[in-house]
Structure formats: structure tokens, C-alpha cells
């Protein structure tokens, strides 16, 4: 179950990552939306995507907290894709490209089993366990945590800036 959940998280993160505004698939016009709103939304999407990659690792390691976090991620993916597919947000005068629509439908199909699996695990009280749960961290030293966290922060800021500028038509 933990491997299947990890694969769903990885695929969901990959699917979301190809939808960065200004990329090959997401090229709708969002110039009418406030730059602040775009930056906040892009920050949320970036955290969801990068967080999914990290959660995949921790779910694979059978960390109890990661299953609950994966439930939140699955619900977040459903919310993001459904509000876009339904035309609620983000709105654009440019029609949704077919490739974008297909990937978003695939994203919903990936998120549904993620939500069901994690909800079942979280509500059943019988979360898969492993001896690794007794370790507070699989990373052995503080400098590694700082390095990885710093790299993720730099990557995230770059993605958010690129996506926001591209959505505003300035990239």
C-alpha cells in the first residue's frame, strides 16, 4: 500500500509540474488576475508539487504522519483540478488547451485513489508501521536538513517567480 501511495504522489507531482504557466502546456492568459493572487496560487501549487515528492519518500518509509499529509495532498489535488476544470479559478479568456484538460483529468484520476487509500488508512487506526517510525528522522545530520531545505527553497522561489511572471505575460 505504501509503495502504491508513493507512486501516486510521484505521478501527481510530475503531472502538476508540467503545468507550470509559461511551459509547453499551460499557456493561457492570466494578465487580468492580480499578481499577488497569482503569486499566492503559484506558491500553493509549488508547495503541493514539491511536497508530493517529499511525501512519496516518507510514505514509502511508512511514516505515520505522511499518510495523513498525503490525504491533505490528495484533497488539494482534487480541489485544484476540479476548480480549474469547472472554470471557477483561474479564469482566462484563452480556452483551456486539450493537453491541459487531459492532464488535469488524469490528475483527478490519480488523486481519487490517493484520497481513498489515505482516508482508509487514517480513519482505520491501523496505519502500516515499521521500525523506522521510531526514528525521528531518516536524515542523519542537521547540515543535510539545512542543505536540502535551502535547495528546495531556492527551487521553489524560482518556480514561483517564473510561473507568476509567465501568467502575467512577462516571462
Image (cartoon, helix red, strand yellow):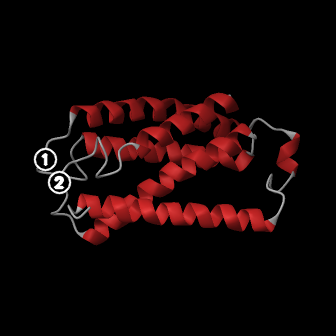
Q: Secondary structure at mark 1?
A: loop
Instruction: Report the Cα–Cα distance between label 1 and label 2.
Output: 6 Å
Residue 31 place in picture, x, y as percent: 17, 62
Name the N-terminal-most of marks 1 and 2.
2
Q: Is residue 16 left or right of residue 97?
A: right
How packed mark 2 is, by other alpha carbons closer than 10 Å (few <14, some 14-19, many 20 or more), is: many
Residue drawn where x is 35% and y is 33% of the image: 103
Residue 62, given in percent of the width and then of the height, sits at 75, 40
Q: Are marks 1 and 2 in contact (CB under 8 Å)?
A: yes
Q: Quadrant of the C terminus?
A: bottom left
Which secondary structure lies at badge 2?
loop
Q: Nearer the viewer, residue 136 or 68?
A: 136
In the image, is 112 to the left or to the right of 141?
Answer: left
Question: Which percent across, then down, holds residue 135?
Answer: 86, 52
Residue under circle 2? Answer: 29
Name the residue beneath numbered marker 1.
Answer: 94
Q: Is residue 36 above or below residue 139?
A: below
Q: Residue at image x 22%, y 32%?
A: 98
Residue 108 image position (x, y, % from top left): 40, 34
Q: Residue at x 29, y 46 (%)?
A: 83
Amino acid at each position: 500500500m505504501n509503495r502504491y501511495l508513493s507512486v501516486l504522489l510521484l505521478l501527481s507531482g510530475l503531472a502538476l509540474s508540467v503545468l507550470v504557466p509559461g511551459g509547453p502546456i499551460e499557456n493561457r492568459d492570466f494578465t487580468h488576475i492580480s499578481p499577488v493572487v497569482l503569486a499566492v496560487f503559484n506558491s500553493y501549487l509549488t508547495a503541493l508539487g514539491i511536497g508530493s515528492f517529499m511525501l512519496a519518500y516518507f510514505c514509502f518509509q511508512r511514516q505515520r504522519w505522511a499518510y495523513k499529509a498525503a490525504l491533505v495532498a490528495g484533497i488539494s489535488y482534487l480541489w485544484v483540478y476540479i476548480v480549474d476544470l469547472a472554470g471557477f479559478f483561474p479564469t482566462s479568456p484563452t480556452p483551456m488547451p486539450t493537453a491541459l484538460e487531459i492532464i488535469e483529468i488524469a490528475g483527478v484520476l490519480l488523486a481519487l485513489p490517493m484520497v481513498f487509500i489515505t482516508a482508509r488508512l487514517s480513519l482505520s487506526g491501523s496505519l502500516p508501521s515499521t521500525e523506522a517510525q521510531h526514528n525521528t528522522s531518516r536524515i542523519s545530520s542537521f547540515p543535510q536538513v539545512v542543505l536540502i531545505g535551502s535547495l528546495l527553497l531556492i527551487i521553489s522561489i524560482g518556480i514561483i517567480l517564473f510561473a507568476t511572471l509567465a501568467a502575467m505575460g512577462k516571462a
